[in-house]
Image (cartoon, rainbow, N blue to C red):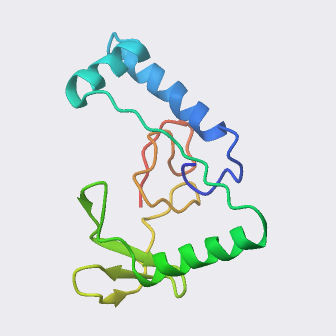
C-alpha cells in the first residue's frame, strides 16, 4: 500500500502507479518489460519465498506469544546481513537508535499533498487543487 488515502489492499494504488509508470516509460520509448529488463541488468535478479509457519491450537498460541516476546526483548541486530540502524517501538510510537538505544519521537510526516500525509515523495500527479492533475506538490 502506498500512502494512507486508499484503505484497501486491492491494488487500486498499485494500478494507478503502474499506469503512470507505463506512460512515463512510453515517453522514453520503452515498454514496462524493457524497463524491467534494464533493472535486472543493473541490479540483478531477485527471488524470495514465503514460508507459512502454522502454529495450531493452544500450544501454537503459546509458542507464538513466546516467539513475539523474544523478538521484542531481543530485536535482531541485522536481517539477512544488513545491519538494523533504527526501529520503531510500537508500545509508545518512538524511534529507537539501535546503536545507542536512544529513543526519539516519531519523525513528523512530510508536507501534505492533496490533504494527505506522505512519508515518501508524493507521486507526480499529486498537487494542490489546480486545473492540471499533473501539477507538482507545493508545500
Foreground residue, 74 or 22? 74
Compared with residue 59, is residue 121 higher up or lower down, i.e. above or below? Answer: above
Whether residue 1 sits left or right of residue 32 in the image: it is right
| Residue 48, image x, y percentages | 43, 38
Residue lying at 58% horizontally and 33% vertically, measured from the top left = 16
Looking at the figure, which quarter contains the C terminus? bottom left
- Which image quadrant is residue 138 in? bottom left
Q: Can you tell which quarter of the image residue 76 is in?
A: bottom left
Q: Toward the viewer: 114 or 131?
A: 114
In depth, the one of 40 and 29 nearer the eye is 40
- Residue at the right extreme, as displayed: 57
Q: What residue appears at the point 36 percent right and 87 percent down from the top-left corner?
A: 104
Image coords of residue 50 (percent x, y): 53, 43
Residue 55, image x, y percentages: 68, 61
Q: Residue at x 48, y 39 (%)?
A: 49
Query: Residue 134: percent from the left, percent from the top?
Result: 49, 36
Amino acid at each position: 500500500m502506498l500512502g494512507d488515502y486508499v484503505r484497501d489492499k486491492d491494488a487500486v494504488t498499485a494500478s494507478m502507479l503502474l499506469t503512470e509508470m507505463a506512460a512515463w516509460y512510453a515517453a522514453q520509448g520503452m515498454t514496462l518489460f524493457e524497463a524491467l529488463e534494464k533493472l535486472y541488468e543493473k541490479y540483478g535478479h531477485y527471488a524470495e519465498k514465503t514460508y507459512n509457519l502454522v502454529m495450531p491450537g493452544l500450544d501454537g498460541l503459546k509458542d507464538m506469544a513466546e516467539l513475539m516476546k523474544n523478538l521484542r526483548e531481543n530485536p535482531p541486530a541485522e536481517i539477512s546481513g544488513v545491519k538494523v540502524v533504527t526501529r520503531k517501538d510500537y508500545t509508545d510510537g518512538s524511534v529507537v537508535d539501535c546503536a545507542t538505544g536512544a529513543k526519539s519521537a516519531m519523525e513528523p510526516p512530510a508536507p501534505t499533498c492533496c490533504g494527505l500525509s506522505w512519508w515518501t515523495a508524493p507521486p507526480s500527479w499529486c498537487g494542490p487543487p489546480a486545473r492540471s492533475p499533473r501539477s507538482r506538490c507545493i508545500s
